[in-house]
Amino acid sequence: ADCSVPERPPAKPPETPVSPLPDRPFSRRRHALVVVESGCDRLAWRRALAAAGATASTVVQRPGESPAELVQRAISELAAPTASLVLVAGPRMDAHCLDARAQLLRAFAEADGSGDRRTIQLDGGGVARFAMEALSEMARHQLRSSGIRVLGPSAPEPRAIVTSTSRAA
């Protein structure tokens, strides 16, 4: 029987923590969270935000996923400072869906912002457009003291959520 002691691999040198590079242009970009319900176009918003100089995370509703499950996944993305929230509504208009949308707006309002003024953009087509316009009016009223700007589907263009709220350099 072999009684030799196996050799230990050499010890790794301790890892040096890497600090972020100060004052890089990408560190000043605003971050947006785009939440897209079933049946909606997510690419148009991502393109518009990228063109306006924002980074974006996108949470898209999965087939068979409930509105509450979608919103819980979106809320988990709010752990990182987020300057803008875009909610693109699908055609569903039941109480579960409306409650989930309100919960998402509440979570965004309570989450740690990016230090900039923050914006919520509500969008939707067809019947959803009217529902999101009504939700934007209610949210505008509820959040008026928070400094969060709420834009409805009638906002001039998607890039307004980034360019009109950016801090002066």
Image: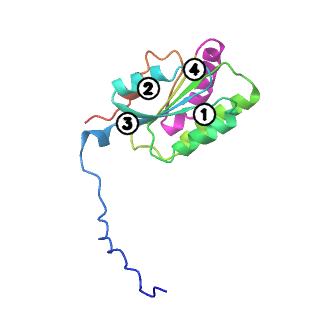
How far across and down, in percent of the image, does residue 138 sit?
A: 62, 27
Magenta segment boundaries in residue numbering: 125-149
| Element class at badge 2 | helix
Q: Are marks 3 and 1 in contact (CB under 8 Å)?
A: no
Which residue type carries mark 1?
A: Gln
Q: Which residue is mark 3?
A: 30
Mark 3 vs mark 1, foreground winner is 3
Mark 3 vs mark 2, foreground winner is 2
Which residue type carries mark 4?
A: Cys
Q: Is residue 43 above or below residue 68?
A: above
How far across and down, in percent of the image, does residue 83 sit?
A: 43, 37
Q: Which residue is mark 2?
A: 46
Going from N to C along the chain, the mark reached first, 4 or 3, is 3
For this rendering, which residue is in front, 99 or 26? 26
Dominant SS type (magenta) = helix
Q: Are marks 3 and 2 in contact (CB under 8 Å)?
A: no
Q: Which residue is mark 4?
A: 40
Disc 3 and disc 1: Cα gap in Å?
A: 24 Å
